[in-house]
Structure formats: structure tokens, C-alpha cells
Amino acid sequence: MEDRPHPATDATAPLEGPGSRARLAAIPVSLLLLAAAFLTDWITGSEIASSLFYVIVIMFGAWFGGRRLGLALALLSVVAWGIAHRLTGVPFSRSSILYWNLLAELAIYIITALAVAEARSGLDRVHALAAHLEDARRALERETRAVGQLQLQLLPQRPPPIPGYTWEIVYLTSTRAGGDYYDFFPLADGRTVVLVADASGHGASAAVLMAMTRVLLHTARDLPDRADRLLARLNDQLAGALPSAWFVTACVAVIDPRSGGIEYSLAGHPAPWVVHRGGRPECLSSPGGPPLGAFTDSTYRSGATVLAPGETLVLHTDGVTESMSPGSDLFGESRLRDALGASSNGDLAGMRRTVLGRIDGHRAGAPLSDDLTLLLLRRCEPKVSQGAALEAARSQA
């Protein structure tokens, strides 16, 4: 690609475009200033430093009109200085001194014109570079915003309805595009696979890795019905496709809505929580294996629990516990435990608001240091009919 000088950075560029009007306007102004300097030099004679008048004119012309105008004013200033000296009639001891003075004045004026023109050209180059950088930043911002919008469209628009259960979901990115991912996959036997994942890195690169993971899941002919087997398959697919130091952490939970049974497995991901009735949060054990794509032939283990009526399953990415205060203090598991315990008696939306409120209060205005995803699944209390309630009261009496 041919390099071409930018008009604003080339001191010898022709006077055309928006900047040409300013350069053309500098010519008559410079000539008027030169005439004023000549008259001042003539009137004052040799009583003051008349060269200063011409230097100011040359600096003005070179700054606003460019190098060519500055050099032209330098020559005209020497001529004006010589004419003013002749008109004042103050002789030098030898005529050669006059010529040496003219040469010295010319050298000073030329150096001044070149230095000022180069300074202005350098400033114009800086401004042009800043404009190019701003254009590039805006283009990158538009592209990142488009990636973020596409990423949101790839996420489920709403969780699948599970009779007897309610959902609350929070998804926040630290940049325009993020690497967190969650998804749902109904199984033929009525169970539901829930996945929460976190791609390494931030921004567009993490969003691309998240999209790759989604494609692998949604193009599979059949998904394993066990959490550990699903993670093992994903790891085999990603391990040979990802560059070095790229990986995905994940939590897979297979939910049986009839029994409340949950089978889960982790790939370098934070463990789930269960908030029991009465407000006691419990962080489950962490069976599983390494992050997806980090190693080939990784094996994964699974754990199991049962969600009783009134209890809540909490799945999250590390953006929850690693939210930082302005002093770089992490939110941590202890604060998450307190937030979950403080909100257990209300509805699920209230729990979501309480946890987010505690995180926002801890951040105190600091930006998110990582993407944040929080999934809450509560098994509802069974509804008791009015007749059954009366029968239970009579039996107790």
C-alpha cells in the first residue's frame, strides 16, 4: 500500500482543502505585519532592536502559512531591514559590515522560519495521529458493541419452564462483550441440563471462545445425560482446537424436576451453592476436573444432591466472588454466603436483588473486574388446598 502524506502534516502541501483557507488568510495578514515592522524600523532607526519586529512577522507567517510563506517573509524581512537602514542614514564603519549584518539577519530569519514551520508541522502530525487513533477507537468500539449484541442474542432469551420451579438470572459483562455463558438443554426423560461457563480472557476474544463452546453444544447429535461425561466430551473437542493458554471453566448440573435430584460436575469452576430452608447456605463439594481445553484426556467426576421444596440452587461464575472494591478487596465466598443467608426468607427475585445489592455495595462504584453470571433455581413449596389444610388441622386437634 502506497504511503501518502497527510495534507495537515506536509508543510509543502498545496494550499487546498479546509486548511488552505487559513493559509491563504495568513498571507495578507503577514504582509500587513511586515509593513508595520518596516515602518516601525524606519521610524525608530537603530534606537531599538528592530530585528525583533521581523522575527515576529516570520514566526506568524511560518506558523499559520507554512514553511514556504515563512521563508518568503524571511527574504522580504532582510530586504525591508536593508531599506530601513538606508532610509535612516546611519552608516557602518565599513560597507562590508552592512553585508555581514544582512547575511546574519537572513540566517536568523531562515532558521526561525524553518524551526517554527517544523514545530507547527509536528503539532499537526500529532493532531492527525490523535484523530486517526480516535477513529480507530470508535471503529473498535462499534465492532465490540456488535460482538456484544450478537453474544446476547446467542444466550437463551428465557430459561425453560420447569413445573414447580422458578428461575432468576443475572448476566453482566465487564466490557461490551464478555466470556460468560449459560445455557439449558432439555433431555428426553424430562430432566434438564444447565451449563454455566466462563471463557478465559475478556472482551471479544472471550466472546469468540464462548461462541465456539455454544456451537459445539448445539450442533451435537446427542448430549450425554451425565454431567461428567458432557464435560469430558467438551474437553476432547476444545483441547485440540484452542491456542495455548486458552480454556473454559464450566459447571454442568443435570436437574430431575420430579425428585429434585441434581447431578453436577465442575471443570475448574466455582462450586454450586444450596440455600436450605431456614436460610442456611451450603457450598457443595467440588468434584470434577481441570478447565476445558487445558489438557487432553482429562477425566471428570460428578457429585449429587437433592433440592428439597423451598430450597434454592445457586450457580455462578467467578465474577461474583472476584468483584473488587476500590481497594482491590475481593467480594469472596464469605460475603456471598452472608448475602444468600440474608435473602433466603423472601422470594427469588428478592434474593437476586439482595445479592446484587451486596456486590454493588462492595464495589462502591468500581467497575466490574470480570464478567458476572448468577443463576438461581428454587424448588417451590407444594401448594396445599384449603380442604387439605382443614383436614390437617382436624387431625392435629
Image (tube, rainbow, N blue to C red):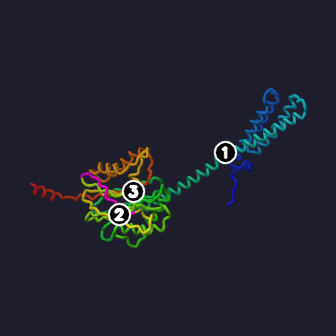
- Residue extent of the magenta highlight: 278-289
In the image, residue 93 above or below residue 21 = above
Residue 161 x %, y %: 32, 63
Q: Which of marks 3 and 1 is in front?
A: 3
- Which residue is the extreme one toward the right? 94
**Mark pair 2, 3: CA separation:** 14 Å
The kind of residue tagged 2 is Ser
The three-letter amino acid code for the residue at tag 3 is Thr
Q: Does the magenta stretch include residue 285?
A: yes
Quarter of the figure with residue 23: top right
Find out whether the residues at labels 3 and 1 contact each other: C-beta distance under 8 Å: no
Q: Which of marks 1 and 2 is nearer the N terminus?
A: 1
Which residue is denoted by mark 3 in the rendering?
A: 317
Q: Which of marks 3 and 1 is nearer the N terminus?
A: 1
Position of the C terminus, as image quadrant, is bottom left
Give the class, few, some or many, for how many residues have Cα within 10 Å of label 2's Cα (few <14, many ≥20).
many
Mark 1 = which residue?
A: 123
Residue 353 makes an appearance in the image: no
Q: In terms of secondary structure, where does tag 3 sit?
A: loop
The reply to whether the C-beta atoms of the residues labelled 1 and 2 are less than 8 Å apart is no
In this rendering, position of residue 294 left or right of residue 335: right
Q: Rate crowding at label 1 as few (under 14), some (14 to 19) or many (20 or more) other CA atoms within 10 Å.
A: some
